[in-house]
Image: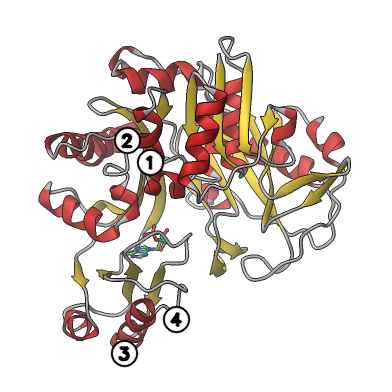
Amino acid sequence: MKVLILGSGGREHALAWAVARSARVSEVVCAPGNGGMVQTGRCVPVDLKDLTAMVHLAEAEQPALTVVGPELPLSLGIVDAINERGLRVFGPTRAAAMLETSKGFAKRFLQRHNIPTANYAICATSAEVEKAVEIFHPPIVVKADGLAAGKGVIICDSRHTAAEAAQGLFSGALLGQSEHQVVIEEFLEGDEVSFLCISDGKHVTPLVPSQDHKRIGEGDTGPNTGGMGVYSTDTLLEPAMSEWILRHIAEPTVRGMAEEETPFTGVLYCGLMMTARGPQVLEFNARFGDPETQAILVRLETDLVDALEACIDGRLADTELRWAPGASACVVASSAGYPSSYKTGVPIAGLGAAAQVPGVQIFHAGTAQVGGQLLTAGGRVLGVTAAADSLEEALARAYQAMAEVHFEGMYYRRDIGRRAFRSAK
Ligand code: AMP
């Protein structure tokens, strides 16, 4: 069968790699893909902001399955549009994707269904914000309602700065687009965990847990990024805690969406804060995370295509996902200056030697093949990913491979996964 992957990042490279391993898959088409995905499939250009162009591509290619990587096509209704043309696609409809595309919708939904989340107020005017901030103690979290590519959350140390941040979101000064509503939220303390599940609209199957590293600097310092690295271990969440999250967060979410007649099919990514009063939902994503997917899929032993098709067909309850025991880690190499401005078009060397390290997969994010040469093409350039029996070994392999990779201005955090050893020290 032919599978079409929409997207161009490390997540999509990992999806293409996992899909290509399926015995049932004869062809992978990546749109638009990147400099690494050309090894896995045929890359064809497409604008991920252009719904009509993506639908035309699907109609022309007639894939047996389309997998949507990023949130933007989901927010445009790509799943509805491809379904309407009688083609099979993995991902939520536009209405179900609102769990990610509107934070206001997600917060109200969580409250309606008694799913634990931070206290909040949804405000449509600065006057409403002024009133709302009075009831929260600083730090106060201010969030854009809509998609903001990781830039829509501002943690403010006073009521005054919270009101200013909200004003910046309303006016468009902060994100370049003006928000019609903002979420004011209580600040939660704890460790963050990404709990990803797949769902067929009724049944929920968790993937292995993982922990992202959002800040650019070691020791979790500096500005937020799309994610500088991630690790996954069996011990990241106690089985009883995983079960609790499944029963009290993931399953009620899928049940609630079905009750509201917007059944959720796809990846339900629960971004959680493990607080003293238990796990609380920080946000939902309606798709695979990046770079979580890289660390998760290198541990998947069963066929990814079978699992995705089981979601589409409502057969997930009868489908087993098996995982390699142990651990995995993904360390991101970024361009100098990221997450602010950075240079592209810089030659990349050493990937051949890096790929020789046992257990290592190198997923490309911002790369391009130009005239037979591999060049940087984005802020996050590569995700060097390794699986092993233990986290120590997975990290050692990822960093050994990373030491072989070179490009001018290359930066990576040397403390990915370090948190896992904190309690052991
Ligand atoms: P979100 O896009 O909602 O996940 O927010 C991005 C990041 O902001 C999260 O990964 C957290 O690190 C932080 N964050 C969001 N909401 C809160 C909160 N209520 N309390 C503390 N940190 C938060």
Q: Which mark is residue 160?
A: 3
- Is 357 above or below relative to 278? above
Residue at 45% across / 36% down in the picture? 235
How much space separates mark 3 and mark 1, taking CA atoms? 34 Å
According to the picture, the residue beneath numbered tag 4 turns out to be 173
According to the picture, the residue beneath numbered tag 2 turns out to be 242
Q: Residue 126 vs residue 407: left or right?
A: left
How much space separates mark 2 and mark 3, taking CA atoms? 38 Å
The amino acid pointed to by label 1 is Phe
Question: 365 or 124: which is nearer to us?
Answer: 124
Q: Earlier in the sequence, mark 4 or mark 2?
A: 4
Assign ligand 1 to one image quadrant.
Answer: bottom left
Q: Secondary structure at mark 3?
A: helix
Other residues around mark 1 within 10 Å, as few (<14) / some (14–19) / many (≥20): many
Q: Quadrant of residue 260?
A: top left
- Is 60 above or below relative to 50? above
